């Protein structure tokens, strides 16, 4: 039986959407107020989905404490209360859009998750705007 288990998490972070190779005017035209040179922040909500086969001995797909610990160590400790542009190495040359944040989260978790599992990341930047990334 294939099933998906989810774990929710939360982190707060600031960022600025801009490209270093564009003028301030072009960045403002494309990214609008999200290109504020003084940054802006979000209360991100994260849902991490793990899909695979249920272990017939334990009845678990995955021990959710394992997933909780991976998320805490790899995501919350790494991103929470940070300026993504200035404090998170992955965004040194990568624009911290919600799409790219989801991609970074996926890759950080994927490295620590048993390869037998499929992984999906759902990242809410606002209650109405979210990204779903499955590593495709």
Image: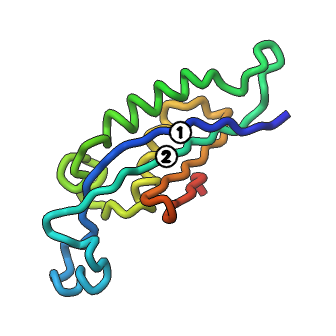
Which residue is pictured at 33% across the width and 55% down the height?
A: 42
Q: Do the residues labelled 2 and 1 touch (CB within 8 Å)?
A: yes
Q: In which quarter of the image is residue 125?
A: bottom left
Please state if 17 lies on the left or on the right of 105 as rendered: left
Q: Which residue lies furthest to the front in this view?
A: 127
Residue 85: horizontal and vertical position, in percent? Answer: 22, 56
Q: Is mark 2 on a helix, strand or loop?
A: strand
> Is the residue marked by circle 2 packed among few (<14), some (14-19), or many (20+) residues within 10 Å?
many
Which residue is pictured at 25% across the width and 54% down the height?
A: 14
Which residue is pictured at 57% across the width and 52% down the height?
A: 135
Q: Is residue 78 above or below residue 124?
A: above
> Is the residue marked by circle 1 packed among few (<14), some (14-19), or many (20+) residues within 10 Å?
few
Give the mark nearest the N terminus, 2 or 1: 1
Coloration of the structure image: rainbow
Q: Give the camera-side residue of 128 and 72.
A: 128
Q: In this view, does 6 lie above or below 122?
A: above
Q: Name the residue under label 2.
A: 46
**Figure quadrant of the N terminus:** top right
Q: Name the residue under label 1.
A: 8
Q: Which residue lies furthest to the top in this view?
A: 57
Residue 82: horizontal and vertical position, in percent? Answer: 24, 45
Q: Is mark 1 on a helix, strand or loop?
A: strand
């Amino acid at each position: 039986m294939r099933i998906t288990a989810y774990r929710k998490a939360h982190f707060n972070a600031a960022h600025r959407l801009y490209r270093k190779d564009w003028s301030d005017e072009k960045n403002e035209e494309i990214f609008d107020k999200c290109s504020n040179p003084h940054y802006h922040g979000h209360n991100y909500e994260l849902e991490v989905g793990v899909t695979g086969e249920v272990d017939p001995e334990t009845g678990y797909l995955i021990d959710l404490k394992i997933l909780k610990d991976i998320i805490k160590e790899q995501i919350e400790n790494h991103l929470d209360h940070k300026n993504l542009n200035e404090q998170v190495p992955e965004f040194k040359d990568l624009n911290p859009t919600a799409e790219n944040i989801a991609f970074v989260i996926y890759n950080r978790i994927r490295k620590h998750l048993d390869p037998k599992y499929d992984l999906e990341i759902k990242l809410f930047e606002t209650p109405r705007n979210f990204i779903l990334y499955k590593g495709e």
